[in-house]
Amino acid sequence: MRGEEVWITGVGLLTAIGGSAGENWKSLRAGKCGVDHHPSEENASLPGNFAYHGVVSGHEDPPEVPPKLASQRKFLNRSSILGLHAAAEAVACAGLDMGEVSPERKSLYVGSGDFTRVGYVDFYAALKETAGDAWEAPEPALLNEAALHRVSPFYLLEGLPNNLFSYLSSMYEFMGPNGSFSSLSSCGAQALENCDRVLRFGEADVGLVVGCGSWAHPMVLLELDGLGILSQAKEGAASFRPFDKRRDGFFPGEGAAALVLESAESARARGAKPLGRVMGTANCQEYSTERYIPVPTGAVRHSVESAVAEADIEPDDLAFILPHGSATPRGDAGELSALLEFSDQVKDPVPLAGWKPYTGHMGSASDLADIVLGLCALKDGRLPPTPGFERKDDAFDALHIPTVECAVAGAAFLSLSHGIGGQSSATIVAAP
């Protein structure tokens, strides 16, 4: 995997705390929390904790697009719109004219996690109108008529998992190696790994990686709550506290993150300067028969060791680590156990920080968001703390988890992401 060096030349980020990468970093350092209480008619009859999530405001419509795609905008779902904004920022940040790159030398990888079209939510208004206050079975003819006026005929198209991938492919004419991943948290890291590898192997010159997710929806909340991984909101929005002894789960959110990757040779040829370098990536899996699968310690350990080996760095070179930090009791314990073993290889404890409470857990967007913000932390030499963290389990006393912003120094950082089902992803990114 030595191959060609891969540079990060552009970044984009849209979350509940900012409309750009720079704004998000400023909000993070200021301790701004985007998770809030958002009651609605749809979640009024659901548990109280369902009203807590991070919501992006002011980006209801997609950015300006080529005229040939204008008619297709109506098919975009919520997370795809957010993904388009992040992608546009990343391309602009890179100063890249996509039209100057041969379509066959452009690579696109997208990790998506938009489940807002799960079930029959689109038919809610029509059902409510025809079922009456008692919610009795409506007359089929009346329901048909109401649905014709209340339900968008494009709702199935909006629910396609490759919604954003298809749009970006056409918008920027990506015809090189590509992929669309749709699942839970690790999709963004998977997209990054695949794009990094095709650039290293010389199969493309430019790559765009996007992670987008929209989990602030009643159907998604019901699914997450059924898995037992949502916080019960006993202390409101402050209940999302990764690594803390009192942790009981997370609050979801919505957002998107994007990275422009280029081979160093291609970037140098056009005079581009790197924001960072992708040094090592790894994806590992560990099977478990448990119903509520914890973060697999073995898979985390293996992915971390593999990424460090591929990056060809020493553990002491790491300035900080950004764990997945979903704040579930067993999930955090599994992840921290693996990092505790890893810490035996370093002279001085590497500081850890979990930033999901600032934005809410954004699914496929969260791991790429951590990488964008991690680059900012590496550049400024400052590491914002984990919101809500005060004290850790006794077993993890040796780990360094700052409670206030601290100075950091080092050549690189490690980002971790885990998915339900035993998956663990690790990414090492270095300074320019």
Image (cartoon, rainbow, N blue to C red):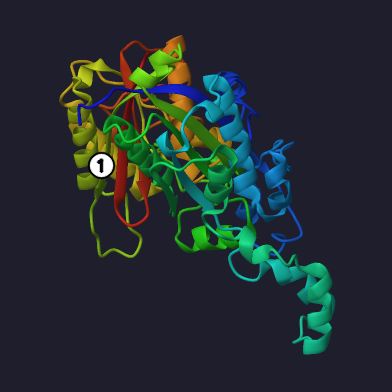
The image quadrant where one finds the N terminus is top left
Mark 1 surroundings within 10 Å by alpha-carbon count, few (fewer than 14), some (14 through 19), many (20 or more) = many
Work out whether residue 253 or residue 239 is closer to the camera in this orientation and state it. 253
Name which residue lies at 27% across and 24% down. Answer: 4
Name which residue lies at 55% across and 50% down. Answer: 166
Can residue 240 be seen in the rendering of this structure? yes
Residue 199 lies in what quarter of the image?
Answer: top left
Please, what is the three-letter code of the amino acid marked with disc 1? Val
Residue 223 location, x and y as percent?
52, 62
Q: How many marks?
A: 1
Figure check: 279 above or below 298: above
Q: In this image, 416 relative to 155: left or right?
A: left
Regarding mark 1 in the picture, which secondary structure is present there?
A: helix
The image quadrant where one finds the C terminus is top left
Work out whether residue 276 or residue 106 is closer to the camera in this orientation and state it. 106
Figure check: 273 above or below 368: above
Residue 18 lies in what quarter of the image?
Answer: top right
Name which residue lies at 38% across and 40% down. Answer: 189
Can residue 132 be seen in the rendering of this structure? no
Work out whether residue 87 or residue 414 is closer to the camera in this orientation and state it. 87
Figure check: 120 above or below 20: below
Name which residue lies at 74% across and 36% down. Answer: 58
Residue 240 location, x and y as percent?
52, 41
Residue 185 location, x and y as percent?
43, 47
| Residue wearing tag 1 | 300
Residue 64 location, x and y as percent?
72, 36
